[in-house]
Amino acid sequence: QLTLYAAHDEQVVELPGGALRLGSDAGCRNGAFAIDGHVLALQFHPEFSREFMVDLLDAFGPKLAPEALTAGRAQVAGGVDAPLAWRWIAQFFDQATLR
């Protein structure tokens, strides 16, 4: 289980043929998936910093439902597992290069 930042209007709602779901949450069924060990798709953002997320919430706050904004600010106040996600991403591509 990971906690990562996510911010998007669109998402993959149906997996492509041959895809293996690697992660999901209540708001995004196909949050991470791989295809044939050489395509990795992520719908969360390990590259986002806490500061960026605060700025993003400030910018988009007026367009969000109040409960979504409150939930977003609560998540930003807590920690995220970005370093672990980056290690998994690097391992995926290391293994893909070995094939």
Image: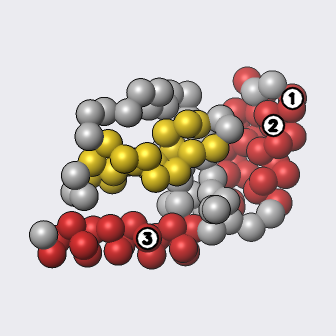
| Disc 2/disc 3 C-alpha distance (Å) | 29 Å
As drawn, 87 above or below 80:
below
User: Residue at (27%, 48%) from the top-left corner?
Assistant: 35
The quadrant the N terminus occupies is bottom right
Pointer 2 or 3: first along the chain: 2
Write down the residue under mark 3. 88
Label 3 is placed on what type of residue? Trp
Q: Amino acid at mark 2?
A: Leu
Task: Determine if residue 50 is in view.
Answer: yes
Instruction: Indicate the amino acid at tag 1.
Output: Pro
Circles 1 and 2: CB atoms closer than 8 Å = yes
Q: Secondary structure at mark 3?
A: helix
Q: Residue 69: which disc?
A: 2
Residue 21 lies, in percent from the top left, at 43, 46
What's the residue at 35%, 73% (across, down)?
Answer: 90
Left or right of 13 on screen, residue 7: right
Determine if residue 52 is in view: no
Q: Position of residue 71 (x, y in %)?
A: 82, 43
Residue 77 horizontal/vertical position (percent): 82, 60
Residue at the left extreme of this rendering = 99
Q: Which residue is mark 1?
A: 66
Q: Is residue 67 above or below residue 81?
A: above
Q: Quadrant of residue 48?
A: bottom right
Q: Disc 2, disc 3: CB below 8 Å?
A: no
Give x and y (percent) for residue 51. 68, 60
Left or right? Give the position of 38 relative to 70.
left
The answer to whether mark 3 and mark 1 are in CB contact below 8 A is no
Q: Which mark is residue 14?
A: none
